[in-house]
Image (cartoon, rainbow, N blue to C red):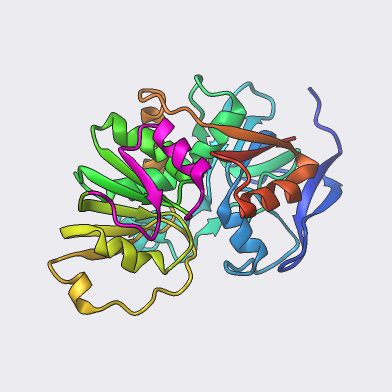
Amino acid sequence: MSVPAAMRAMVFDGVRQPLRLEQRPVPVPGSGEVLLRVLACGICRTDLHLIDGEVEIANPPRVLGHQIVGVVEGTERVVGVPWVGWTCGTCEQCLGGHENLCPNARFTGCDIDGGMADYTVADERFCFPVPAAYPAPHAAPLLCAGLIGFRSLRFCSDAQRVGLYGFGAAAHILIQVAIWEGREIYAFVRRGDTVAEEFARSLGATWAGPSDAMPPVALDAAIIFAPDGGLVPLALRALKPGGRVVCGGIHMSDIPSIPYSELWDERSIQSVANLTREDGREFLELAPQVPVQTQVTSYRLEQANEALADLRAGRFSGAAVLIP
């Protein structure tokens, strides 16, 4: 298939503006980059944070989308592109094995044009082979929702009873991994969201209930995916002594004041920032073994604004994916 001269892209122009469908030239890969024909691009809550100005895009216009599955042009190789799109490789963090904390990092769909388009370019070093078991729409959510959930779970160490606050794309993947590892999952959802409660139970949650309720047993760890800082004190109260609250989102509203007594007994709060390529390799090798099954709602590329609105309103279970 020959590469066309032009493509469609959903473009971010400014904060709180709808994405704009634009015809633009197909990008030309530079040194070390590959041109990808996009097969699927997952919709992520980070996209909402970008649109709302909670995470800054320094130089719009920008093509959003950082859960990309595409075919490397001129080959049949299907690869996935995550949020971290480039790191310097020379700073203290990179040399110390913490490239997710690289101060010079560039992020897909934020500093680099992303996958809400027919074509995109990506640094070949940050492209992961997509497991053959996954069609493109079902692989896309693994590249952020899956990876961030996986990294968050690793910060829980060997916790047996784990609470998940916010049961969206990340949690619906992570619960499958956690149960496969022999853990118990306690799912916390918005009060009154019986659909999310039933979805969590259908995936094997030991208990599901509102986020302002206490679980029936004390938890060893809790992971917060919802961007609500008010959940941090609630999660702390649900923990055993020595337990940890892991905040898995890139943005969260302010955390309310916490009495020291609720942090006492060696409880802790941990944030998760981005991911490493090692995370990607490890998780994408693990996912088919579980096997992780993603529940997706598909939208056409030009329906990106509708998909984002549905995500904001919680109108679907699992993940949303754009299909150019």
Image quarter of residue 95: bottom left
Regarding residue 27, the answer to whether it shows in the image is no
Location of the N terminus by quadrant is top right
Position of residue 30 measured from the top left corner of the image (x, y, whole percent): 66, 46
Image side of residue 283 versus residue 260, left or right = right
On whether residue 208 falls in the magenta region, the answer is yes
Whether residue 90 is situated above or below residue 173 in the rendered picture:
below
Image quarter of residue 213: bottom left
Q: Residue at x 30, y 33 (%)?
A: 179
Q: Residue at x 23, y 45 (%)?
A: 161
Q: Residue at x 37, y 38 (%)?
A: 175
Of 44 and 187, nearer the camera is 187
Position of residue 282 measured from the top left corner of the image (x, y, whole percent): 35, 35
On whether residue 298 falls in the magenta region, the answer is no
For the magenta stretch, what is the residue range?
191-216
Regarding residue 76, the answer to whether it shows in the image is yes
Q: Residue at x 40, y 46 (%)?
A: 149
Location of the C terminus by quadrant is top right
Whether residue 167 is situated above or below residue 92 in the rendered picture:
above
Image side of residue 184 versus residue 229, left or right = left
Whether residue 320 is situated above or below residue 288 in the rendered picture:
below
Image side of residue 234 versus residue 124, left or right = left
Give the tally of numbered discs.
0
Position of residue 21 measured from the top left corner of the image (x, y, whole percent): 83, 50
Of 313 and 52, nearer the camera is 313
Image side of residue 159 versus residue 293, left or right = left
Position of residue 52 measured from the top left corner of the image (x, y, whole percent): 65, 66
